[in-house]
């Protein structure tokens, strides 16, 4: 193994790796955590880690990558949701990746940062090419800094009115519950109902279960449940990493939509996270704000954008060709991934 080759992740390094990521990446994403690498252990992906020197800034950037064999082309590297990226860091990652052994034909990178012209220019200047995203580019991030009154003052009026009505008028209750087999089964049921109702794409139940199993073990994931008249209305799975949290999985029933249970559930989650010291809570995917009114998930847009003044647009996805075999991936990769999804019902990335 060369000095510039990423090393396989080891679960014994978990606490030290998490601390390194939280120090070296601005607002490190959970996909850069040790727990996320553990969730991939039973998948075709193999976790790797590297620490990239950024000489221009006098720092080091820890990065967690994953490798997988791609049909025809060979092995690809995937760097998901990395943060702490500057133009100098793009230069450094590019140079580092080009020094890796040639068994990897390319590197796909998704950045957990708002899109800026300076970063786009840095990727393009270094020879990265636009690529299909496996993660969403538009989201809502809720600022939890300040007092709870200051947090609530940043919401749109419809959010405040809705969660107050849910609690005071309809008597909805929200609790944080243990991730027991019974509660996990209930969450699977609600996700299944949501899948049928929406007609959208959802990962296999085994995918969700693996993530829940790992994150409850390390204490970075929790369930919340909303009840109305003794009946479960909705559930959420929330991941925390450092001072950031994510609304990762959720399910709900169709009935009783006018009691605003999801609004109260989110507000109670935010109160709990605020008490823990979390300063940012991401509500995940929304449609492109430029075309949300024609989206099949426009209801999610209306709901999630009630919690922040403006949505976030993350950096686009890029790939860095590392060998001539990348041309095969660029030509046939999208088709090969589509075939894989049709055959297995699962996403390739």
Image (cartoon, helix red, strand yellow):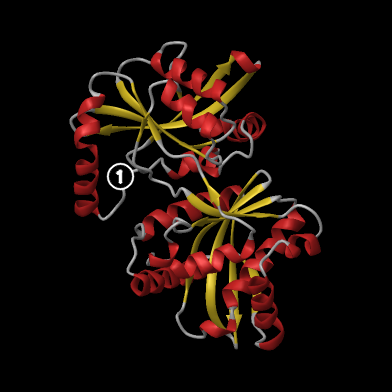
Asked where in the image residue 89 lies, by quadrant, the reply is top right
Q: Is residue 175 above or below residue 287?
A: below
- The quadrant of the image that shows the C terminus is top left
Of 77 and 92, which appears nearest the observer? 92
310 horizontally vs 100: left or right: right
Residue 199 percent across, percent down from the top left:
32, 69
Residue 52, horizontal then vertical, whole percent = 54, 20
Q: Is residue 9 visible?
A: no
**How many labels, in total?**
1
Q: Which residue is mark 1?
A: 348
Against 94, residue 284 (above or below) is: below
Of residues 106 and 295, which is closer to you in this image?
A: 295
The crowding category of the residue bearing disc 1, from other C-alpha atoms within 10 Å (few below 14, some 14 to 19, many at least 20), is some
Q: Position of residue 299 (x, y in %)?
A: 47, 70
Which residue occupies the foreground of this view, 140 or 223? 140
Classify residue 156 as left or right of residue 338: right
Q: Could you say whether the residue bearing mark 1 is in a helix, strand or loop?
A: loop
Q: Is residue 320 visible?
A: yes
At 40% from the left edge and 33% from the top edge, which residue is drawn? 318
Quadrant of the image containing the N terminus: top left
Dividing the picture into quadrants, the one containing residue 270 is bottom right
Q: Residue at x 58, y 24 (%)?
A: 61
Residue 138 located left or right of residue 341: right
Tell me if residue 164 comes above or below residue 38 in the rendering. below
Residue in the picture at 45% in, 21% down: 6
x, y percent for residue 145: 75, 52
């Amino acid at each position: 193994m060369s000095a510039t080759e990423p090393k396989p992740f080891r679960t014994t390094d978990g606490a030290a790796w998490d601390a390194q990521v939280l120090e070296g990446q601005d607002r490190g994403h959970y996909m850069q955590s040790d727990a996320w690498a553990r969730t991939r252990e039973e998948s075709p992906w193999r976790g790797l880690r590297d620490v990239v020197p950024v000489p221009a800034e006098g720092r080091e950037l820890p990065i967690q990558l994953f490798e997988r064999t791609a049909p025809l082309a060979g092995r690809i590297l995937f760097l998901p949701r990395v943060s702490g990226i500057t133009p100098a860091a793009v230069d450094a990652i590019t140079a580092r990746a080009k020094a890796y052994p040639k068994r990897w034909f390319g590197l796909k990178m998704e950045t957990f940062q708002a899109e800026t012209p300076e970063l786009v220019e840095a990727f393009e200047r270094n020879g990265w090419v636009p690529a299909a995203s496996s993660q969403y580019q538009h989201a809502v991030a809720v600022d939890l800094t300040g007092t709870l009154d200051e947090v609530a003052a940043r919401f749109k009026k419809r959010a405040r009115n809705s969660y107050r009505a849910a609690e005071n008028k309809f008597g909805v209750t929200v609790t944080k519950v243990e991730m027991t087999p019974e509660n996990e089964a209930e969450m699977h049921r609600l996700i299944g109902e949501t899948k049928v109702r929406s007609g959208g794409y959802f990962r296999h139940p085994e995918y969700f279960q693996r993530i829940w199993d790992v994150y409850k073990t390390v204490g970075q994931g929790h369930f919340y449940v909303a009840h109305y008249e003794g009946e479960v209305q909705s559930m959420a799975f929330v991941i925390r990493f450092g001072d950031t949290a994510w609304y990762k999985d959720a399910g709900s029933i169709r009935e009783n939509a006018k009691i605003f249970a999801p609004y109260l559930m989110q507000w109670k989650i935010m109160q709990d996270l605020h008490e823990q010291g979390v300063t940012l809570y991401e509500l995940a995917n929304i449609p492109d704000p430029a075309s949300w009114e024609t989206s099949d998930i426009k209801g999610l847009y209306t709901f999630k954008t009630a919690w922040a003044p403006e949505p976030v647009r993350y950096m686009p996805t890029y790939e860095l060709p590392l060998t001539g075999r990348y041309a095969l991936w660029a030509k046939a990769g999208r088709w090969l991934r589509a075939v894989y999804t049709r055959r297995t019902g699962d996403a390739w990335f």
